[in-house]
Amino acid sequence: MDHIYNFSAGPAVLPRPVLQQAQQEMLDWHGSGISVMEMSHRGKEFTSIIEELEHDLRELAGIPANYKILFLQGGASSQFAMAPMNLLRGKKNADYVITGQWSHKAAQEAKRYCTINIAASSEEANFTYVPKQETWRIDKNTAYLHYTTNETIGGVEFHWTPEFPEDNQIPLVADMSSDILSRPLDVSQYGLIYAGAQKNLGPAGLVLVIIREDLAGKPLPGTPALFDYQIQIDNHSMYNTPPTYAIYITGLVIKWIKQQGGLSAIEHINTRKAALLYDTIDHSDFYQCPVAIPDRSRMNIPFTLKNPELDAIFLSQAEANGLVQLKGHRSVGGMRASLYNAMPIEGVVRLVEFMKEFASKHD
């Protein structure tokens, strides 16, 4: 077998050139004589790594100067609490759009700190679509509106950004864990963006936070210092020891994306990959995707077999063909192929070839 293609939803595939560079630099980073894992987070070597990452990220995503970038611990789930702790700013309510398990979990956590208004939900259809914005019921006194741009488990993705009237300046909060940097991004439309790294940015242990600077500085009374955005900003993400090696790898990933041609080029590649798999599913009565066509994710593609009794055989034979981590989430079942930035198109080609062959033998 010449190559293993990893379709895991996260921790997920990383670009091979990034892994190769990390391998080369494992014992001696740039002549320092030590590994990045051994560096002081306040030393000049690591300071240069994190500063270069921020510079490259601002350039790649066009992040305005009035937005602060933080590299924190705790994964995206930590932000389920940090967002209300910091963004309520004297208000009692927050709005949430529920399109899957992760946005549901975010809302449940926020209930600890405020009253939650469910502005919209697709739960009645098993989270298989994105509710149109004209159906949303937004609380006029809300502190912010939160949504998840891509639901990793259910494979539902927003292909548009919510918009508000000019006289309604509600901060928009987005969990972008599984589709961040998969396409161009207008950061200025958001008050807060956060993303766990282990899907499209780097290894587990890091969460990226991008916050408009005027939204920080008024946390709830009793907010732990570690969870105060302003304290993290003032300390340049180093109030405590940050996840240094994850930050280093993420820096390499950002450079790799730039080398691919930036976010527009990555979007083109991701669109081609997803189209290959969806076309295979849609042109066969052997496979089905439950998600409404306009809201299908390009990052996480769930699908089922006509006969569920074949699931175990499908997974076993797929693994024998170098196609791993295709089992669907336990709450959904079936299969799920995650096609993050680092998944090469060759992996998708091999997957669809296998799917066609498997269907021809078992239909």
Image (cartoon, helix red, strand yellow):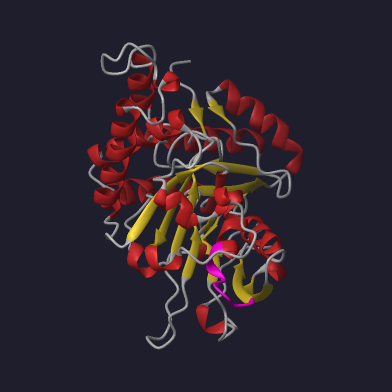
Image x and y of residue 19, in percent: 39, 23
Q: Is residue 88 left or right of residue 187?
A: right
Which residue occupies 37% across, 14% down?
Answer: 34
Residue 245 location, quadrant: top left
Figure quadrant of the C terminus? top right
Image x and y of residue 64, in percent: 28, 60
Work out whether residue 184 or residue 316 is closer to the camera in this orientation and state it: 184
Image x and y of residue 128, in percent: 62, 63
Residue 57 is one of the magenta-drawn residues: no
Q: Is residue 202 left or right of residue 152?
A: left
As drawn, 205 above or below 333: above
Work out whether residue 112 or residue 106 is closer to the camera in this orientation and state it: 112
Image x and y of residue 104, in percent: 67, 61
Work out whether residue 231 or residue 136 is closer to the camera in this orientation and state it: 231
Residue 88 is one of the magenta-drawn residues: yes
Residue 148 location, quadrant: bottom right
Q: Is residue 68 left or right of residue 205?
A: left
Residue 221 location, quadrant: bottom right
Q: Magenta segment, principal secondary structure? A: loop
Which residue occupies 27% across, 52% down?
Answer: 264
Work out whether residue 222 or residue 341 is closer to the camera in this orientation and state it: 222
Q: Which residues are magenta?
A: 86-92
Q: Is residue 179 visible?
A: no
Q: Is residue 91 visible?
A: yes
